Each structure stands twice: as C-alpha cells, then as structure tokens.
Amino acid sequence: MAWLRAATWGLFPRRGYCSRGSQGQLSPSFVEALKIVVGDPHVSTAAAVREHHGQDESVHRCQPPDAVVWPQSAEQVSRLAALCYSQRVPMVPFGTGTGLEGGVCAVQGGVCVNLTHMDRITELNPEDFSVVVEPGVTRKALNAHLRDTGLWFPVDPGADASLCGMAATGASGTNAVRYGTMRDNVLNLEVVLPDGRLLHTAGQGRHFRKSAAGYNLTGLFVGSEGTLGLITSATLRLHPAPEATVAATCAFPSVQAAVDSTVQILQAAVPVARIEFLDDVAMDACNTYSKLNYPVAPTLFLEFHGSQQALEEQRQRAEAITQDNGGSQFSWAHEAEARKQLWTARHNIWYALLAASPGCKGYSTDVCVPISRLPEILVQAKEELKVSGLTGAILGHVGDGNFHCILMIHPDDAEELHRVKVFAEGLGRRALALHGTCTGEHGIGMGKRQLLQEEVGAVALETMRQLKVTLDPLGLMNPGKVL
Amino acid sequence: MAWLRAATWGLFPRRGYCSRGSQGQLSPSFVEALKIVVGDPHVSTAAAVREHHGQDESVHRCQPPDAVVWPQSAEQVSRLAALCYSQRVPMVPFGTGTGLEGGVCAVQGGVCVNLTHMDRITELNPEDFSVVVEPGVTRKALNAHLRDTGLWFPVDPGADASLCGMAATGASGTNAVRYGTMRDNVLNLEVVLPDGRLLHTAGQGRHFRKSAAGYNLTGLFVGSEGTLGLITSATLRLHPAPEATVAATCAFPSVQAAVDSTVQILQAAVPVARIEFLDDVAMDACNTYSKLNYPVAPTLFLEFHGSQQALEEQRQRAEAITQDNGGSQFSWAHEAEARKQLWTARHNIWYALLAASPGCKGYSTDVCVPISRLPEILVQAKEELKVSGLTGAILGHVGDGNFHCILMIHPDDAEELHRVKVFAEGLGRRALALHGTCTGEHGIGMGKRQLLQEEVGAVALETMRQLKVTLDPLGLMNPGKVL
C-alpha cells in the first residue's frame, strides 16, 4: 500500500473516476517506482513543472498533475501505464500542450506522460506514401525531414503540434479542404492501453492504403483525446508534394461576399488546396503582428496546387468567381518565401490577437456547419460579436464549413468570461440547429461536453460511454474529458 | 414462452451465441409477432425464400434463416430488433445478397432482415455534397437519381450493391484510388442497435464535412459487417461530376510491366481516377462475355477525370510511363457510351468468369499490400496459380495495392475446394508478411477470421471482441462473422 497516492487512490469504486484530495501528492514510493521505469532525471514533481503541464493554450484554468514523466520508449509507456493501472492513478498524455480545449488539464491529478522525448521518425516508405512517427515528432519537424523526398504531410493546425497529439485530437487545419483531416490521414496507431497492453490498431507494421479487416480501431482512437489510451506511434499517409504552388489573397466588401465566393468556388469543383477566411479584426492583428500591409477587410487566403497548367486554370476560375462577388484583384504569392510569409501570418493569428491584447488569454470557438449554411451563421456570428461588446476576430477553414471566433479575455474579469461562455454556447447551439457540429477540429475537451450530448443525442452518448468503460474500465485515461 | 424458437432460444448463456437445433424453426407465435410488426405479406418462412436469403455470391454453403422479414421503416426495424432481442433470436441484415464472404449466411438461423423495401432517397443536399439513402438504394439507383445534379457517388464494387450494405462491408471498387472507400465517404449512419434503440452515429440529421466531436461511431460501424447493428440509413458524401472524362486500355508484355507502370504513375502523382489490372485470363473471359476484342494480355484499364486541359496532361504523363514499360498505345474511350462499355465489361468480370466455367462457383481472394510490394506479390500469385492447376483470373484495383484472384470451383469437387483454400490462405499470409491486409474490400465474413487474428494480433482482436460484446451483449447480430 506504500505506493498509493495519499490515502485516496485505493478507495475508488471499480468503475468510477477517482476523486482527488486537496493535497494531491503521490506517495514517495510511487514516485520512486516511476523513476525505476523511466530513470531518475525523467520524473519531476516540481511545482513549476507540474504547473506547466496542467494547462494548454486555452482559458481552462491550470490543473497540474502530481508528477510528470518523460518516457523514452513505448515499452516504458507500457510499464508506466501498468504501474498507474495497478495503483489506479490517472494518466494524462502530453504532447506540445498546444490544445485549445483543456485536454491536458489533470482534473484528477495523477501522472502526466510527456511524450516529447520519443521524437524519432522510425520508418519512411516513400514508395508507399507512408511514414511512422513517435509522439514527439511535430508536423513541422516531419515536413522538414521530408523536404527532399517529393512528399509532404498536409494536416496543419495553427500550432506546430505533435502529430500523435493531432491524431488524438482529430485535428485538421488549412489544407483539409483538399487533403482531409487526421481522420483521413492516419493509417495505423500504436497505442498503450490503460492496463499497459500494446495495441496496434491495424496490426503491427502495417501500412496498406485500405482495408476491410475487422472493426476500424484506428478510426476509434483518432479523436479520442487521450481518453482511451496513450498513442506511442502513428503511421501517417503522405502526399506527393505539389508540382507547383501559388497562393493569393483577395479582399472583399463584406463577410457575406467572401463566404459566398467560397461556397461558389467549391461548388464549381475548383480543387482549391486552401481557402481561409479572415475578418477585418483578424487582418488588422495580422498586419501589426507580422508587419504586413494587407487591406483591413474581410479577406480570403487561397492556395492552389498542381501542375503549372492546372494552376493557371484553377486561378482563372477562382478569380472569376471572387470578382463576381466584388472581391479585389488577387494579390499573388508565387515564390516559396512569399507563400511562407503569407501562411506564417495566417498560422500566427492566434498569437497576433494575443499580442494585440496584452494580458489577455484567448478562447476560440470551433463550430462547423454544412457549407450551404456557412454564410448565414458567419454573418450572424460577426454581428453578434459586435453586439456582445466582446473583442474578437473571426477566421476559418471555410472550405470545410469550419470557422473560429477568437475572443480575447481578461483573466480576472469574471463577467467577461461569462459573456464569452454565453456567446460560445449560443454559437455552438446555432451550429447544431443548422445540422453542424460544435467542434470541427479542436475536440470536446472539458468545455463542450454538454454540447456533445446535444449534438449526438442520448443513444450515441450512451454508446460512447460504453466504449469508454470497455476500453478504460477504471476511468484512468485523461479523466473528465469528452464524456 | 410460446414465442420462443423450438425449445432452444431461451437457454443460451447470457453472452454466448445461441446454438441451433436441426429443426431450426421459429415458434408460430414468434412468426405471428413478426407479422404484427411488418404486416403479414412481409414475413416469409417458405423454404425457397429462406434458401435464397441464406447465401451470397460466394462459395460459402447456404445457411438459411428461419424467417425473412421485409420492414418498411426504421421504426419497424427497431421493433423487430427489440422483439428478437427479447427472445434472443439472431438477426442477419440482408441487402442485395451480393457479398463475397458469406456475410448473410444465417449460421445460427434466426431472422433475416431484408431491407430492400426501404429504398427511398430521403434527402439530397446538392450544395453540401451530401445525400441520405435508405438501405434499399443501390449505387446505380443513386447515380441515376443524381444524373442531372452535377454530382455523383464514386464508390463502385462490381455488383450493383446497396449503399448501406456497402457501408456495412467497408466496400470500395475502381474509383477508390482517387475518391476513397466507403470509410471515406460515409458522413453519418442511422443504426438500429440489437436491442432496438436507434443510434445516429454523428447525431440526427447532421451532414457536416468534418468533426472532432467525441468518438468516431460512424467509422466504427462502417465495415462492421452487420455484427453491431442494422444500418437503416446512410448519409453519404457526394463529389462533383468530373467536367470531362476519358478512359483507356493499355496491353503489356508481362504482369510485371503492367504493375510497374501502375506504381510509377502513382509515384508521379498523376491524379488517375481509376487504374485497374486484368490478366490474360480475365481479358479472355471479358472478350467472350462482353463480345469485345481486346488483346489477350495483361492489361490496364485507366480513367482520367478533370477539365479537358487537365485530362490531356494526365494522359500524356500516364502514356509516357506505360510506353517506357513496353505497354501498347492507349486504346481510347472518349464517348460516354464507349466508356460505359469498357467499365461494364470490367465490372462484369465475375459473371464473365462464371459464364466461362459452367456449373462452377467463384471464389475471390482480396489481399491488399503497400503499393511498393504489389509487383512481387502479383507476379508470384500469377505463377502459383499456374502451378496449382486451378482455373483463375487475376484482376485488381492496383492503384490501392488491392487485387483479386478469382478462382472457379466445381461445387462437388472437395479436393479442388481444398486446393483453393490452401492457395487463398497462402496468398493471405504472403500479403500479411508484406505488411498488407487479408481483405481490401470484401470483409472478413466467415472465412477469414483466422487471418484477421494473424493480421491484427491478439490485443487488437481482444479489443474488437470487447467492442462486440459491449454493443451486442447477447451476440445476436449476424453471429459467426468477423470474430
């Protein structure tokens, strides 16, 4: 019993989540046991370290774990899980900590498993368009590694997130309109189950293009937000690097005009690789932060991939549509450096908005609706944002029907925080009423559990709960998230 | 107790599958109860009807259900399931009966739920590229319905299968290389769970393009082969009909040359829509059955989609590659009628081979390997086929690494059947050794359960078993399949 977390861990009902005492420390002998698994320097119970691991980039308050461990291998993760399982200690996987829904908050304490030391690209099969990465590999690191192969990995959330974290979240980003999300680009996962067993969702070492063999376990773990197991390796689908690429921006007289253009471009089947919307507030922050000089107006950022010939054709068709809607001439970024500047500015919006509101934290909504309903909800959201008196910008992966209102919050202003919550929930419910979802890519995390219930209904929620209990019978994996 | 199936149904252990007496009849009162749900004319216990529903197009022997019912609505399916659940009677969903792995064999008798009377297209959202179909709608019926919308649904197994059956199987076909499989094209499912509850996997009425909301239930049910519930409606993703289309055939001096060309075309990132391989045996049967005059040689059937300009570019690049590999000049099919003839001939290969071997049944292997391993396994399979003395043709969706050996079997020749089994299992294991899968698109059904175990490993299989028990605790849904 000496390993048990002070007086509480051993007492939980078999299927319930463990509750947490205010002391929240692990027993010294349990910490010792962690050190035996991963080595002394790879365990920390220091307050600053725990604080750092108790929050992501969202407004959810810091809830630190009781210890942080840095395993070096799947075998160590497996032994850590078995140890935690035997003592009923919660486990929280941690990648880059760039989530936006409080996914890493240790609401019941326990052990935070920081997977960033496992950062090898263990297998690259260029002929098969696949790669195997450990959880410490980020999307930028992978693409740097792929630079000379003629291949790339397109899924790109704003942050330079870890790829396994992106798999856990079901992330997407600006290229999803053409290349799909993580759900479409994960071929296989290695997962440590809560009791320490090692699962290969599609069979060890397999990286085929398609399969009809049994239940789709890969699909079940993608987007499970660390609540079913710890992802220790991901086999990803790569794509041929486009022969040619060109990016452009286009300013519009109104939100409606920009979004109408998006819908029409998609309906005309122009195979656009990226089509991103930024409102005037976002453009202003973008100019300031990235030292640029775009018009401060509703704007589309577009990118086209293909042969030179194909680009020309796509460009012509897209530009004809935007001009019909009153858009400006396209402002082109042909060279790699110019395109990089454009997309870096886009990816840095979150940080740009934070920089424009010193002392604030950010909260991002994440609804996604059928594309035909996008103009109405986006225009309405923009108006309500004005009425609410909140400071916020709208941007979105509008090609997928997914957009974000990024709201700036003064951390000590409880009334403002309440207004943000009211706004966000209202927007979520409006998306649900339009047959949409409350989260396109950020996940449910802590804050959208009520909306999830409204979105999927009682039977689906009960089914998800049953799956959770089946795969994590002691409720130890990232408790308090999703369900 | 009067409803119970003669003396046996009530006696099964709670989680075990029910065993079946040789009499295999349902009690008259149970049949009466079925009639109360769906109406008298929509229940049959006639031997001929039951026989018809006890087998698909595979070699698996007929195992008839005890009754066949034709529900008219999801509500009726729900009541049927609740009735069967209360009496522990197995349920087997039935669509077009065109499966190839014995998926409809009623190995424990019970009620076959023939869903073909539910054949409405209940919702079409052209602007959102989505459609909602009941389980009686086949892929051809859907595409006929879509003809004037500028949209189409690309997934096309050989048979004119029902779309919900295709979802249940995780089917694909000739367009998967560009448009993906059912796994990529199902947005939402309405499922009647074994106890009769109605589940909407992504929430009722939702048809967004992407989501990160909770566990991916849609993905779990796609490919579950009727073992987790009865699919009563599917929301599918539609694609813009290509602006222009051109198809071609190209003959090669060897299997190796044809497959090498495929790999190189993919690696050159030519966005080919279809790339199908047929060996000399298949081409011969194709010529005879479809009254055509192709060279009897290893052949690729290709199709290109895009604008006229894009087609020209794709064509040039593909033809340069095939000619480098010794391929013939492309034989073109520009007009819709000529293309239809070409692809109808391709889709009819199964029937062409059966027609060429009167009195025989067909068995199709279905392995899928990483594309780089395709040449070696395909060439070797072709050689082993010769050595084995079996009659068979090879064809495949080689762009996905997926191919079929279609073997002709004299139903009364037990020794030949044994040789087929040995060949098929050997081929399956060779695919597994090359990091492939034993089934790219036909599913596990009855015959590949051992191979599934070898493919995914003990932990994944145990996880699948746990999921099955969770969602179907009485083991009533299509027992004896997959696991």
Image: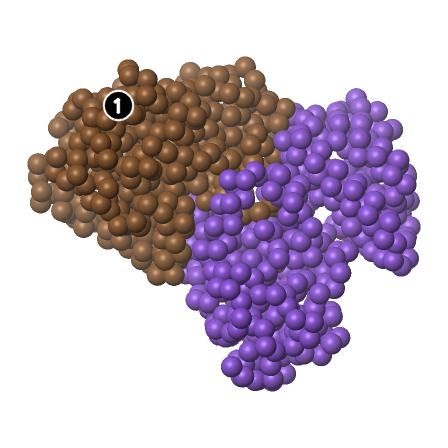
Chain colours: A brown, B purple
Q: Which residue is mark 1?
A: A32
Residue A383, how many percent across, how many down?
A: 23, 48
Residue A1, how many percent across, how many down?
A: 24, 35
- B198 sits left or right of A358 in the view: right
Count of residue discs: 1
Rendered residue at 44%/36% (across/down)? A197
SS at badge 1: helix
Foreground residue, B22 or A445? B22
Chain letter of disc 1 in the image: A
* Amino acid tagged 1: Glu
In this view, A330 is above or below B163: above
Rendered residue at 44%/65% (across/down)? B198
| Callout 1 crowding tier (Cα within 10 Å): few <14, some 14–19, many ≥20 | some
Foreground residue, A277 or B41? B41
Query: Residue A98 occupies which quadrant of the picture?
Result: top left
Residue A248, how many percent across, how many down?
A: 43, 28
Residue A134, how many percent across, how many down?
A: 44, 24
Query: Residue B422 occupies which quadrant of the picture?
Result: top right
- B473 sits left or right of B314 in the view: left
Foreground residue, B355 or B6? B6
Rendered residue at 59%/23% (across/down)? A125
Decide if residue A215 is in sight here.
yes
- View extreme (front): residue: A1
- A92 sits left or right of B209 in the view: left
Rendered residue at 77%/33% (across/down)? B378
